Image (cartoon, rainbow, N blue to C red):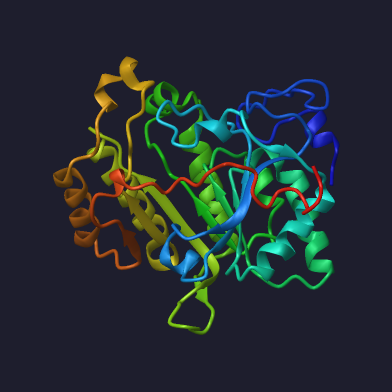
Amino acid sequence: MTESEYKNCKLCPRNCGVDRSVTRGYCHESDKLCVARAALHMWEEPCISGKRGSGTVFFSGCNMGCVFCQNRKISRGEVGKIIDKERLSEIFFELKDKGANNINLVTGDMFIPTIRWAIEDARSKGFDLPFLLNTSSYLNLDVVKSLDGLIDIYLPDFKYIRDEDAIRYSNAPGYVEAAKNAIAEMVRQRPEPTFFPEKDGDTIMKSGVVVRHLLMPGMLIQAKLIVKYLHENYGDNIYLSLMNQYTPNEELSAFPEINRKVTDREYDSLVEYAQGLGIERAFVQIGDTADESFIPEFDCEGVIKNGEL
């Protein structure tokens, strides 16, 4: 692990150069690993969760600032426990023992140096489940390159294709270029989806890229442009995950244009557009997903060893 990566932090396009051993970055985090939950999660895409669940590790903090964030308790660093890198490696084995299909590293973007060390440590001890990076895609290209050979499955967001929207709704200047570069590198590393042999009726991804897009109210044209861009550049080398679960929160009074749910008509139009392009490798959401809860309790389950405080 390169400690200097935290002392002059440039993991994301903000390139703020903060010494996180002294002060917290925009991401709300220091150089100490902070985790809010480590448990099986059943609500990812079917090829990731399957019936047994994805072994999710939810990291505290976030390098973006989405006004519509559904995980505000962890994204703002309000919950979580400090652990060392050795404990993170142990958690991987504990999740495997619980039956996890994979290790799902959720919003770990600001802890990539520590994550790299923990993956290498676990693999040196015989760990054999796929590692999955669940990311906003707001990462510098060299950071994604540093994960080559360590991450088996990439689950990146592609939130915006207009920087003005990225700035207004996520305070993320340069998001579009960063996301495009990051996803291109992810596909270079994992250019073709592969799957484990079916077990118990599950088809579980072993390697590949699944790009998520959350449809936002009034942004159907932008969503279609994102789908078109991804299809033209990557075709069937990736899976798309088109999501309709956008849920307004109490902080959106200053953003009335997005202070509502996505309509069935908007979402159906996006799915039909993707079908019209000939996209076959895609996941869609059915029913009133905006009324369902895909958010677990961030109660630090699985973070600390039994018997430790």
- The spot of residue 26 in percent (x, y) is 63, 23
Q: Nearer the viewer, residue 308 or 123?
A: 308
Q: Farthest residue toward the front?
A: 307
Q: Is residue 164 above or below residue 274?
A: above
Q: Please tell me whether residue 293 is drawn above or below residue 6 in the rendered image.
A: below
Determine if residue 79 is in view. Answer: yes
Identified at 72% across, 23% down, the residue is: 24
x 69%, y 24%: residue? 25
Q: Residue 274 is drawn in which quadrant?
A: bottom left
Place residue 151 in its image quadrant: bottom right
> How many dots with numbers?
0
Residue 298 appears left or right of 198? right
Residue at image x 77%, y 54%? 306
Asked where in the image residue 96 lies, by quadrant, the reply is bottom right
- Pick out the residue farthest to the top: 254
Image vertical order of residue 297 relative to residue 67, above or below: below
Pinpoint residue 147: horizontal percent, then vertical percent: 69, 54
Residue furthest toward the left?
Answer: 265
Residue nearer the viewer, 45 or 304: 304
Asked if one can make out residue 244 in the rendered structure from this viewpoint, the answer is no
Left or right of 272, for residue 210: right
On screen, residue 14 versus residue 212, left or right, reads right
Compared across the picture, whether 265 is left or right of 19 comes to left
The C terminus lies in which quarter of the figure?
A: top right
Question: Where residue 129 appears, x then y in whole percent?
Answer: 66, 70
Task: Residue 54 in the image: state x and y as whole percent.
Answer: 55, 62
User: Looking at the image, which residue is at 80% across and 60% down?
Assistant: 120
